[in-house]
Each structure stands twice: as C-alpha cells, then as structure tokens.
Amino acid sequence: MAKAPSKARSARQRSAPARILNRELSALALNQRVLELASDPEQPLLERLRFCSIVSSIVDEFFMIRVAGLLDQAVSGLAVRSTDGRLPQEVLDEIRERVLALSRAQAKLWAKDLCPSLAAEGIVIGSVDDLSTRQLRTLERRFEREVFPVLTPLGVGPGQPFPYISPLSLSLGVRVCDPNTDEERFARLKVPEGLPRFLRSNGEGPFLPLESVIAHFLPRLFPGMQITECSFLRVTRDADFEVSDEADDLLEALQTELRKRPFGDVVRLEVSESMSKPMLALLKEGLRICDDQVYLVPGLLDLSALSELADFDRPDLRFDPWNGVTRGPFTAPDARTLFLSLHRRDALVHIPYDSFSSSVEAFVGKAARDPQVSALKTTVYRTSGESALAPSLIEAARNGKQAVCLVELKARFDEQRNIEWSQQLEQAGVHVVHGFPRLKIHAKATLVVRRDPDGLRRYVHIGTGNYHAVTARVYEDLGLFTADEEITADVADLFNYLTGFGKPQNFRKLLVAPFNLRESLVEEIRATAAAAKAGEVASIGIKVNALHDAQMIDELYRASQAGVQIDVVARRICGLRPGVKGLSENVRVRSVLGRFLEHSRFLIFQRGDESRYLLGSADLLPRNLDHRIEVVAPVEPRSLQAELDAIFEALFADTAQAWQLRSDGGWKRVQPPKGEERRSAQERLIKRARSRGRRLQLPPA
C-alpha cells in the first residue's frame, strides 16, 4: 500500500481551506448524525435501536464502494488528489480514525444506554451464563435442532488452506489444541445466515446473540479437543464493478460480474478487540491485508442486526403508525375520472405523507385496465416484490396494450433482483429494455398514452424516488403528474431514445442528463446571480441527497458573492463550504434526518417576480449530471409551487432533527431557541397531510 506523505508536507498543501469539502469525509459524517439520533432520549426506544443499526449498514456500504476505490488508488501509487488536496492514503487515514471513533461511540451507546433502556422495558439482552438450568436445557435443545446441523468448521493446516470468508458474514475464529499431541490448529466457523441474530431459549427469556450461543456449545463441534481461544470476526470486500462498453449482451455480462462480487478483495477486517495477536496475525496473512485494514471492535460485531430487535412487537416503543392519505385526483372511482382530472390540472404527491399505493400505483393500475389506454411505459431502478408495478405491466400486456419497462440492471446491490424482474416481465409479454453498459437509467418516469374524446393524449408521472412499494413507506419523495403537452412529448422522446436508436435533438421543457441538465442548471444559477447584481431580491433553494459537483459548487459560490441567498438541504453529502467570508457568506446548509429518509430532489430559483421550480431524480453529483439518464421537470402551477415552498420552509424551520453545516466542514445539531419546544419538519408535514385527508372526507355542501 502507498505510504502517506509527511504531515508537514500535507499541512502545507492544505494550508488554505479547500473550496470544496472532501466527498468521502462528508459521506462518512452522516453516520455521526444518525448516531446522534440513536442517542436522543426523545426518540422512541426501538427507533433509536433502528438508527443505531442503520449506522452499521451505511458504514458497510461505504467500505464496499468508497473505501475500496480509495484503496485501489493508493495501491496504484497514482498521486490523484481529492477536491480538498488530499492523497488517497491521507483520506484513508482520516477515514480510519473517524470510523474507529464512531465504532467506540456506537458500542458505548449500545452497552451503556440502549441495553439498559431495553431491559427496563422487559427486553433483556443477556448471555448464556445468565440462564437458569431449565432455560439452558431449552436452549440446548433448540441449538441441537436449529443451529448445530448447519454449522461447518473449516480448519487450517496440511491439506487445508485458509478458508474463503464471505463478505459481511459473522464468523468465529477458533484455536483448538489436541491434548495428546499439543498440536494447535485454527478453524473458521461461519455463523449461519437465515437464522435470527438474537435467540431466546424460550418465549420469555433474554435475547442471546447467536454467535455467543454457538461459542458456548463449541465443544460439540470439536470433540476431544481443547479450545484455547474463540473470537469473532467479520470481513468486508470490494463490491463495486463495471461492465465493459464492449459487452455484446448486457444481461450476460452483468451476471458474470455478479458471480465475481462475493470474491472481491478484502477492504476491512473487523475483529473482537480481545482477539489474540497470534490469531490476528494468522488472519492478516490468510486474507492478505495490512494493519490499517484491521478494525478492533469493542462489544458486539455487526450492530446492523439490531434492526431485528427494533421490529419487536412493542408499538408503544416506536413511532405512531402512519398511513399516507389520498390526494384529491386519486379519489377518482375510475380511470376516466382520474385522467379527466389530470387533464384539467397537474397534481403533486408527497410520499409517504400521501399514499404511494393510492396515487402512483393507482395511476399505473388504472391505466393497465382502462380500455382507452393504448400504451404504458415505465422505468425501474429499484422495486420490490410487493409493488403493484409489475402486475400492472403484465396486465397491460395481456390486455393488448403496448407495455414497455426500462429495467436498470446495474442498480447497485439490486442487480440480481432486477434481472429476475426483467425475465418475469419478458415472459409475460412486456417489452423489456436494459439500457446501456456505462449509462445508468436513474430517471423515474411513467408514460401513459390514452384515447381521450378529443384524440390521443399522453399522461406522465415524474418522480424523485423509485417505484418501490416497501421503501415508499419510509422514503420521502415527490411525484408530479401532468398532461402538459410539451413535458409529455419530451418523456415520449426520451423513451424512444432509450428503446430505440438515435439521440433526442431538443427537449422542450424537460432537463435531461446527460444532454441538457448540467447546462440548464448553470444557466438558472447564473440568471439568479445576474438578478441579484441588478438589485432584485434573488434566492436559490436546493433539496438533494448529495451536492458535490465542482462546477455547480463554484457557480453557487459566485451567486453567493453576487448577493443571492442560497439555502441547501442535503441529507447525505455536501461539498459546499458555507459561511466563508468573501466566498459563501450567503450560503446556509442543513441536513434533516428523522423517521422518514429525506430522499426527494427539487430546486427553487427566485428572481424578483420570476420563479422557477424543478423536480426530479438527479442529485448534484458528476455521476448524475454526466453519466446517468436523469429527468428533471418544471413544476409550473402556482398551487404546486406553494407546496414545494411549504416543504422547504418546514425543513429549514426544523429544530428537532436538523443539523447545520459549519464552514470548517463539521455538523452542529440545531437547537430551538431558549424556552421554545423542538419543531419537527416531518411531524409538521404529517399534520398537514392529516388535514388534507380530513378535508377530502367532508361531505359535499
């Protein structure tokens, strides 16, 4: 691995604050904010547990993709510097320091706060040593019946090479000694997947980590041997891959790459901090890793499994259940009434405050059954087995309609599921298109072609989130429904490009990456800056998951210097450095977290009496602006613009679950003014949705 430069030289190279904050460190900082939520006693206990588990899941993916890429750069020896002037090894060193600190804080939270709090509610996390004789006998029977048959110890020795360790699986590292010969061996024992991580000996006993149960009964697996050490370990591997532009068959090429994914290079080894040096040395040699890739973990490994406990049947320890309301147009009893309503006026839905099933899925379902509909086309980036999307497409095909589905096979970690979806749809008669090797289809769009009384008309849905019924319950997203002739014609042109051959020449209203999105956003920012220079009141509001495109950030800095007030809500990553004198004094950046994952993307440009509202699938990252098919649409009706204003204002007024980005790149939790109660944007939006639902239920005058 490449060596880091001296600290003195690194300090000289970064003597002035970087204009753009480091992407990897900004992404990693999200975990600290989520951990703060897990530490917040005002959050329901089981939801705190879920936040704690989410931290581990995010860190896992971060290592599989971002750290893996940095390791490749460091090993190659290429002096590629990040936006803040760091070499790959320097970023890796900083990541390691932060992850170790995060791991210690997470372990402390679990052991000193969450466990005692759970015990106070009768949910006890115990150990085998705490069991009574009767409970131990019950546990032994359960172990013999459910666990022991699927355990396979893999020893290391003559004729037994170091075993393959699958990614993210929990394992026991065991050293056993033959008392007759004093010969010692190492063995790896994988904790079986498909079993609960936490077991109970009976319905009322304490929850026991599965790995500790296996450790207790280890003599059953090594009869006649002396167990000299047992420790726990977990491996993270490189999970990123690329499909060659030369691939003749995208599906086949992707399936080949997926088969390789479990065997990627090791990027991280997590071990119990009590593991002995000899065992650790054996693991490092067997896995071919260096010291910097080893992470000593205090307490339990893989706290992502706490999500199991968060699902425990205690509604009193969770957020109050929420089922989205149904918006006005979607209360229509039939397709004719729904499409007539959408012909008259555009509609906006805010998921999960509004119901996904009664809006997006109802739109697709009614189109599939409507005899006046002749074509139904949609995109799939991520979806779920519960989604009504695939059944509706299949029904449309069976009803003689043209049914088209653009399935993005390269949606990371959902590739296999999407392959299976595409095969099922094809077998049912749906026209399935897989896109391009190096250009992901990330757009969220559905097109319906209908024979209305005055001729053929197109209707579209353009969204910020995936057509995924499960995540739609917890992911916050927006969707625009419109029959606008120019927008729908643009969507039709885009579908023709994706399914056929040739590039769209000019889009009428849509902003589409990689064609005109970047240039159009730059024009909007510059026009707003020009308005500010001319003395007009000018502002930009941006809500995204991530903002880390160098050109966009520099344009925003220039707009700030021109006098534009720039407010950003970025859930995950932000490279924009706010509040720097002479650079970004007019920039404020917030991150809002909560029971719903803030996932929508929209932009608001105000220039005097002129306004421009945009909504779509794209974050402000180079990959979204240049290397993906993204769709961003204008929101033109004033009533819908007012809704976006209300959402943005609620987020910036949040004093319960909001963080403010400081100019040094750190995040500080927003506190309410002294004497005031916390204000939650998401609770406020739930109340607004309830009010909408009540109004719809009022009897007609």
Image (cartoon, rainbow, N blue to C red):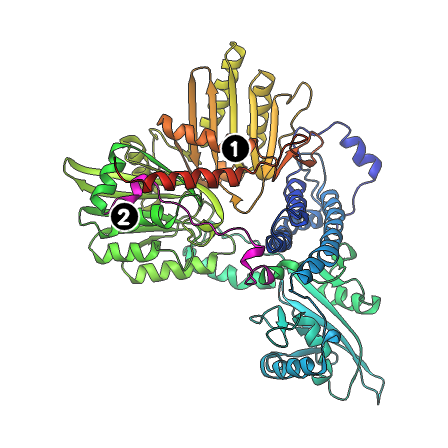
Instruction: Decide which of 671, 78 is in the foreground and name it.
Output: 671
What label does residue 650 carry, if any?
A: 1
Residue 162 visible in the picture? no
Rendered location of residue 331, percent (x, y) = 29, 44
User: Does the segment drawn in magenta span residue 508?
Assistant: no
Q: Nearer the viewer, residue 609 or 295?
A: 609
Residue 464 is left or right of residue 72, and the answer is left
Residue at numbered disc 2: 376
Number of numbered discs on residues? 2
| Span highlighted in magenta in the image | 309-333
Q: Earlier in the sequence, mark 1 or mark 2?
A: 2
Query: What residue type is disc 2 on?
Result: Leu
> On residue 57, which mark appears?
none
Looking at the picture, how far across and down is residue 636, in whole percent? Answer: 36, 27
Picture residue at 51% right of the left edge, 29% below the top: 649
State left or right for residue 498 relative to residue 566: left
- Label 2, residues with CA under 10 Å away: few <14, some 14-19, many ≥20: many
Image location of residue 151, percent across then percent down: 63, 79
Picture coordinates of residue 495 (x, y %)?
32, 42
Mark 1 falls on what kind of element?
Answer: helix
Q: Amino acid at mark 1?
A: Ala
The stretch drawn in magenta includes residue 327: yes
